[in-house]
Image (cartoon, grey):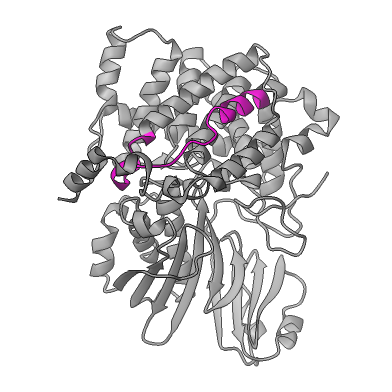
């Protein structure tokens, strides 16, 4: 069994000495369960807020939030929910908390002074947060990145560079003394121990629990921070996965005769230290949650601060009356995709799959197909797991973040994931599932992210619907053994190159494309009133 490591959202494998995070289907791809328009804004900022609370031992009196003018957050932090999520996280709420929509007023009522500034902070990522956190006893500076799909990376504390993904219980020990005696006292029974800094040292201890205070007694220590894990699937010592690319997966002759969903269960079971039954049960629970959200969306949603009104009700009425063009199960996919997108835009609960901005395409396609074909919840859960493995291949070598790779990183990947899922649920072969994903992703290369009025609604709804249609057609031609020609690994590498080569204005900054049309300006001014 081979062991691999790769930074989430990075381009290429990490070195053996790097701190790395192996992708997880439930961490990186199918999830988080959340409210709000954008996982890279809302869910990620909630997690950053939680870790900021831990840094301050749950005592925050003021926070200065800085965004870089050359990044995405300078223009999108308000409209796409970064502020909302961060305030909720600082208050200790989770990403599915119904109070999130009121977090701005709640943080004021809690007596926490908030200032937001746009200035040059030498950001390392388009979604960089610099937080200066203060109470009557201390002040600390935390810098963190949102890397896509709700995933995060802490990059420094008090000016000392380090790396954390929120996947461990982490004890951070700050000292100006020689760290060697402290390291000796800690011993070796930890998942990882690293020393950062020069002169002032940050000792980072990763484990399944925190370092006991008594272990550090008698040492000259300036501060100790205890950061709780924020990801649903934690990491552990000597963690491994069976493969991280299609080529690696296919290099084992035994895998060729197995289904993509079976291999996905293998992957997540080994990555998370979970039994196969638990993996399947977790995804079945997500399918059931999505079914509930679809029903909620079809029944009707309301939210004042959105562009689009309740639309899927009229679509269902026309569909039921037979007044739409006959497109088979695709019309039900359109209904379900729209329902999920409207639930998202009304602050209902959705599942980022792989992001909140693309939350409709994959589950809308899978659950509609499942209903039409009479498939069981387990079959749909297996399809979602198959889709999750395609997402793992993408996140290991590219990025879901529209700020990094454009909308091809969200609805483009969603289409590829859904195409593979549909093939798997229909009983297609592993090679057919991979071919479907490759063709669907090829069809979306270069797709830009240009949300109107800084809301994740237009053109996002249409692109989610198109992604479902792309998935369905790609699945069917793959089942008929159409040739994808370019293997999925090579398409993902191209996806990364094209995405990072897109102009900044077309990567979720609301500075180009449809977002700067005359009508978009009118919509933005109307919503601002």
Quadrant the N terminus occupies: top right
Viewer-proximal residue among 383 and 40: 40
> In the figure, residue 349 lies in which quadrant?
top left
Viewer-proximal residue among 509 and 202: 509
460 in relation to 60, above or below: above
Segment tinted magenta in the rendering: 433-460
**76 with respect to 389 (left or right):** left
Image location of residue 474, percent across then percent down: 57, 20
Image location of residue 336, percent across then percent down: 39, 25
Q: Is residue 219 magenta?
A: no
Q: Is residue 434 magenta?
A: yes
Residue drawn at x 46%, y 30% is 361
> In the figure, residue 517 lies in which quadrant?
top left
Can I make out residue 93 in this image? no
Can I make out residue 246 in this image? yes
**434 with respect to 345 (left or right):** right
């Amino acid at each position: 069994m081979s062991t691999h490591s790769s930074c989430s959202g990075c381009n290429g494998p990490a070195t053996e000495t790097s701190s790395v995070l192996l992708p997880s289907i439930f961490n990186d791809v199918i999830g988080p369960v959340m409210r709000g328009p954008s996982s890279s804004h809302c869910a990620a900022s909630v997690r950053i807020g939680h870790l900021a609370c831990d840094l301050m031992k749950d005592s925050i009196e003021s926070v200065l939030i800085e965004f870089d003018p050359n990044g995405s957050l300078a223009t999108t932090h308000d409209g796409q929910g970064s502020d909302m999520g961060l305030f909720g996280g600082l208050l200790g709420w989770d990403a599915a908390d119904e109070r999130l929509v009121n977090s701005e007023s709640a943080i004021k009522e809690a007596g926490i002074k908030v200032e937001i500034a746009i200035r040059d902070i030498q950001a390392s990522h388009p979604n960089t947060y610099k937080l200066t956190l203060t109470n009557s006893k201390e002040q600390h500076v935390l810098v963190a990145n949102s890397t896509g799909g709700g995933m995060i990376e802490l990059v420094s504390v008090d000016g000392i560079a380090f790396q954390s993904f929120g996947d461990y219980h982490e004890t951070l020990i700050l000292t100006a003394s020689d760290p060697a005696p402290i390291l000796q006292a800690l011993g070796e029974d930890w998942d990882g121990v690293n020393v950062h800094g020069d002169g002032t040292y940050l000792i980072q201890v990763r484990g399944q629990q925190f370092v006991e205070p008594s272990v550090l007694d008698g040492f000259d220590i300036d501060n100790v921070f205890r950061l709780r894990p924020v990801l649903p699937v934690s990491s552990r010592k000597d963690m491994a996965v069976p493969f991280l690319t299609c080529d690696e997966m296919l290099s084992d002759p035994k895998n060729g005769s197995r289904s993509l969903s079976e291999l996905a269960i293998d992957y997540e079971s080994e990555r998370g230290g979970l039994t196969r039954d638990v993996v399947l049960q977790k995804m079945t629970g997500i399918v059931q949650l999505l079914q509930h959200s679809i029903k909620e969306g079809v029944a009707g949603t309301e939210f004042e601060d959105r562009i689009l009104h309740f639309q899927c009700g009229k679509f269902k009425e026309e569909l039921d009356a037979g007044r739409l063009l006959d497109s088979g199960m695709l019309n039900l996919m359109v209904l379900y995709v729209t329902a999920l997108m409207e639930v998202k835009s009304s602050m209902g609960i959705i599942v980022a799959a792989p992001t909140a901005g693309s939350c409709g395409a994959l589950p809308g396609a899978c659950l509609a197909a499942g209903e039409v074909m009479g498939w069981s919840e387990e079959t749909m859960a297996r399809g979602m797991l198959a889709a999750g493995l395609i997402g793992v291949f993408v996140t290991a070598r590219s990025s879901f973040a529209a700020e990094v790779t454009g909308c091809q990183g969200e609805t483009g990947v969603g289409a590829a994931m859904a195409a593979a899922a549909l093939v798997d649920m229909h009983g297609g072969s592993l090679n057919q599932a991979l071919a479907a994903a490759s063709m669907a992703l090829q069809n979306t290369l270069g797709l830009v992210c240009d949300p109107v009025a800084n809301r994740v609604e237009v053109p996002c709804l249409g692109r989610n619907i198109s992604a479902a249609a792309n998935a369905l057609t790609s699945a069917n031609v793959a089942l008929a053994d159409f040739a994808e020609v370019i293997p999925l690994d090579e398409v993902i590498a191209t996806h990364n190159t094209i995405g990072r080569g897109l102009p900044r204005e077309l990567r979720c900054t609301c500075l180009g494309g449809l977002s700067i049309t005359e009508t978009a300006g009118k919509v933005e001014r109307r919503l601002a009133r």
